[in-house]
């Protein structure tokens, strides 16, 4: 039963982390501004489009690159979206580090 208590404590610690709190705050602020929210959606779709090109091992055409560059410029000038992306990245980095730590613990058993 101790393992479940530890997992519950980890979940609580994650929610109390500065990374999680900053991400939640940025998300709430973003959702209050539909234009910013739409810009973020447009940017994420553009990122998926680029990933699709890479997966298919295709060269990204100039039109798509211009579109992404324009979106990135708009994001740099939009504090809500910019802060959201920074806070999202910080939170994801924390979660990835936690996953690596947990994975390394059991990975040794599979060697």
Image: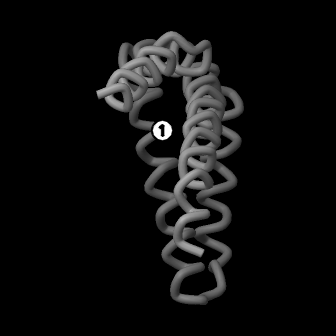
Q: Residue at x 57, y 15 (%)?
A: 17
| 22 versus 98 height, above or below | above
Residue 43 coordinates in the image, percent (x, y): 51, 48
Callout count = 1
Q: Residue at x 48, y 38 (%)?
A: 40
> Residue farthest to the left?
1
Residue 1 or 57: which is nearer the viewer? 1
**Residue 81 occupies quadrant:** top right
Q: Residue at x 60, y 89 (%)?
A: 57
Residue 13 or 44: which is nearer the viewer? 13
Residue tagged 1: 40
Residue 34 coordinates in the image, percent (x, y): 36, 24
| 45 versus 50 height, above or below | above
Q: Secondary structure at mark 1?
A: helix
Q: Residue at x 56, y 69 (%)?
A: 50
> Which part of the image, by quadrant, shows the N terminus?
top left
What's the coloring here?
Answer: one colour
> Which part of the image, by quadrant, shows the C terminus?
bottom right
Residue 35 or 87: which is nearer the viewer? 87
| Residue 26 shown left or right of residue 59 in the figure | left
């Amino acid at each position: 039963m101790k393992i479940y208590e530890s997992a519950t404590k980890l979940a609580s610690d994650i929610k109390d982390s500065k990374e999680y709190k900053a991400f939640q705050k940025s998300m709430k602020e973003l959702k209050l501004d539909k234009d910013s929210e739409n810009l973020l959606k447009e940017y994420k779709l553009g990122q998926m489009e680029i990933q699709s090109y890479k997966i298919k091992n295709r060269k990204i055409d100039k039109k798509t690159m211009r579109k992404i560059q324009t979106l990135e410029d708009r994001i740099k000038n939009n504090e809500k979206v910019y802060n959201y992306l920074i806070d999202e990245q910080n939170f994801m980095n924390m979660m990835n580090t936690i996953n690596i730590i947990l994975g390394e613990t059991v990975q040794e058993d599979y060697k």
